[in-house]
Amino acid sequence: MAGFEIGWFLMLIVGGLAGWLAGKFMDVRFGVLMNIIIGIVGAAIASAVFRRFGIFVEGDWLGYLITSFVGACLLLFVVKLVRR
């Protein structure tokens, strides 16, 4: 979908959902606000990693959710390593 931009409200919803899913998947528990932050930061991390490897995810909300989930999982993996 060319020219699609996710709005800030939808970004919070999708970022929170991705952070929550990643927290369940990685077995790390945080609050709602941290889920949103982890999801949004995870999206930025995954976008940079994907871009580095030449992977481009479709720009709709589902693509943003997948990107956020992968990035949040990477972020939580690093957090778990640092906590040890």
Image (spheres, rainbow, N blue to C red):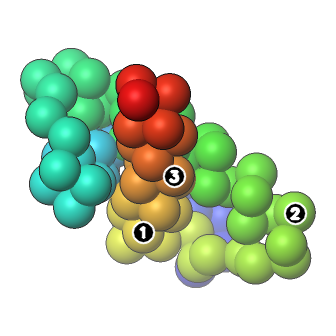
- Identify the residue at horizontal 76%, vertical 51% (top origin): 48
**Residue 40 visible to an observer of this rendering:** no
Disc 1 marks a residue whose amino acid type is: Ile
Q: Nearer the viewer, residue 67 or 75?
A: 75
Q: Which is more N-terminal, label 3 or label 2?
A: 2
Q: Please, what secondary structure does the residue beneath circle 2 have? A: helix
Q: Which residue is mark 2?
A: 52
Question: Which residue was labeled with disc 3?
Answer: 74
Question: Label 3 near label 1: C-beta < 8 Å?
Answer: no
Q: Seen from this angle, which residue lies furthest front? A: 84
Query: According to the image, label 1 marks what residue?
Result: 66
- Is 23 located above or below residue 82 in the figure? below
Q: Is residue 56 shown left or right of residue 7?
A: right
Of residues 10 and 30, the one drawn nearer to the viewer in this rendering? 30
- Drawn side of residue 6 relative to residue 9, left or right: right
From mark 2 to mark 1, how far is it between C-alphas?
17 Å
Q: Position of residue 28 (x, y in %)?
A: 20, 40
Helix, strand or loop under label 1:
helix
- Badge 2 density bin: few <14, some 14–19, many ≥20, Cα 10 Å: few
Query: Marks 2/3: CA distance?
Result: 15 Å
- Relative image position of residue 62 (x, y in whole percent): 37, 72
Residue type at the position of mark 3: Leu
Q: Residue at x 58, y 77 (%)?
A: 58
Q: Residue at x 64, y 45 (%)?
A: 45
